[in-house]
Amino acid sequence: MAELVLTDKRGKFFEIVLNRPDKRNAVNPQMLGQLEDAVRAVNRETGVRSVFLRGEGKSFSAGIDLLSFMELPGKYGEGWMQRMRPVTHDYQRVVTLLERLEVPVIALIHGFCLGLALEMVLACDFRIAGKGAKLGLPESRLGLVPDVGGTTRLTRLAGPARAKELIYSGKNIDADSALAWGIVDRVVPREELVQAGEEFAAQFDQSAPLAIAAVKRVIDGMHDIDRGLQMEAWAESQLVKTEDFQEAVQAFMEKRPPEFKGK
């Protein structure tokens, strides 16, 4: 099996790397499964103080691989659109597993970080973006919602108005705008991302790991993420059955703008 997610422990740092550069690290079910394995591997290691999540190649990730929808009937049955919640739950489970690691998780973002990819980095504790990075949640342009925590976690991070603007429009914003909106914590030259991540993580070295883990649980527990994820899953289970979603998929395949009818 191809290594779609790479891991590397370097002293106190554990690195998780999306490794499908020929597809701009678009996430398919195989990559998702390997990402879950990588996250679980963190908990088996000793001495890890920080985790870095980054992408190989020209972009962090273009998000979900739309062609992977063709694989869903094989895993979830031909009627998967009528039973969307198990699909959503599988993706939510992996991203939430990343969020609940008890060490600081830092996303290092370059190039495109769209859709599911942005949902992944929103689940991290911190986000450092390289100059020129583009971030967005384009699901509304497919007739869907960001259902892997994007709606819930973006609102927690940037506030309702900014979340609505980004999700309603489906537009991309650049790294500097993301910094101004509070979506990323630092913007650095692309070639300095890894160094910047390590320097950022170093500020936690003098703090007790168990204290960091406890504070993380307390702060994250102030927000009802679980309820938000349930609401996202419900919304997606309704939208995936609409004519607008079917039109969006067809338009994508034909490389043309969709014609939505609100049905």
Image: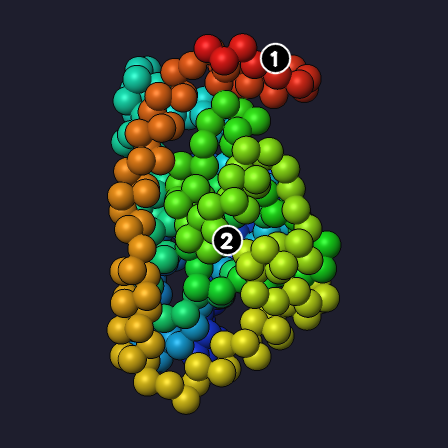
Quickly name the residue at label 2. 158
Seen at 59% across and 55% down, the residue is 181
Judge depth for marks 1 and 2 and give the one in front: 2
Which quadrant holds the N terminus?
top left
Image position of 66 (left or right of 191): left
Q: Secondary structure at mark 2?
A: helix
Location of residue 255 (image quadrant): top right
In percent of width and height, residue 79 lies at 31, 15
Location of residue 232 (image quadrant): top left
Q: Looking at the image, which is closer to me, 28 or 199?
A: 199
In percent of width and height, residue 140 lies at 53, 29
Q: Is residue 245 visible?
A: yes
Seen at 45% across and 37% down, the residue is 146
> Against 127, is 61 above or below?
above
Quickly name the residue at label 1. 259
In percent of width and height, residue 218 lies at 27, 67
